[in-house]
Amino acid sequence: MSALLGYLLIANLAAFAAMGWDKSSARRGVERIPERTLLTLAAAGGGLGAVLAQQVFRHKTRKQPFANILVAIFAAQAVLAIFLMSRSQ
């Protein structure tokens, strides 16, 4: 269980950092991180970090369908977490 939590911590930090880096790159007008990569980081367990970064950095909040896909990934991960926690009790 602690290995899973460690993985999720790293995945969420990576997604948060990638979103921050991409916002910084957008402001500087340099090469950006592809949206596919950002969504992959979110789907790989970093959904919460990506959603938090989206709000903190005000990044890609109006970009559709990116924002909808990101919310769907986070919602699916939240439902899965609730399901797994209820089964472990």
Image (cartoon, grey):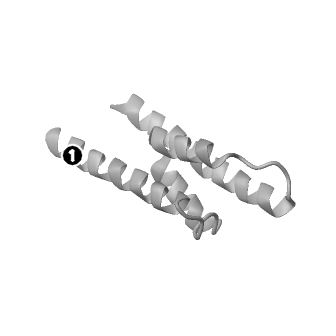
Which quadrant of the structure image shows residue 85? top left
Q: Name above or below for residue 33 compared with residue 53.
A: above
Dot 1: within a 10 Å radius of its alpha carbon, few (fewer than 14), some, or many (20 or more) residues?
few
Q: How many marks?
A: 1
> What amino acid type should be assigned to the residue bearing mark 1?
Phe
Q: Name above or below for residue 14 compared with residue 63.
A: above
Say which residue label 1 marks: 83
- Residue that appears at 56% across and 67% down: 55
Q: Name above or below for residue 27 compared with residue 85.
A: below
Residue 16: % across, % down: 59, 51
Say what secondary structure mark 1 lies in. Answer: helix
Residue sitting nearer the eye, 85 or 41: 41
Q: Is 60 on the left-hand or right-hand side of 7?
A: right
Which quadrant of the structure image shows residue 56? bottom right
Q: Is 14 on the left-hand or right-hand side of 83?
A: right
Q: Residue furthest front?
A: 65
Q: Is 62 on the left-hand or right-hand side of 22?
A: left
Residue 17: % across, % down: 65, 49
Residue sitting nearer the eye, 19 or 67: 67
- Residue that appears at 61% across and 42% down: 37
Quarter of the image that includes the N terminus: top left
Quarter of the image that includes the C terminus: top left
Residue 12: % across, % down: 52, 46
- Residue that appears at 54% across and 58% down: 66
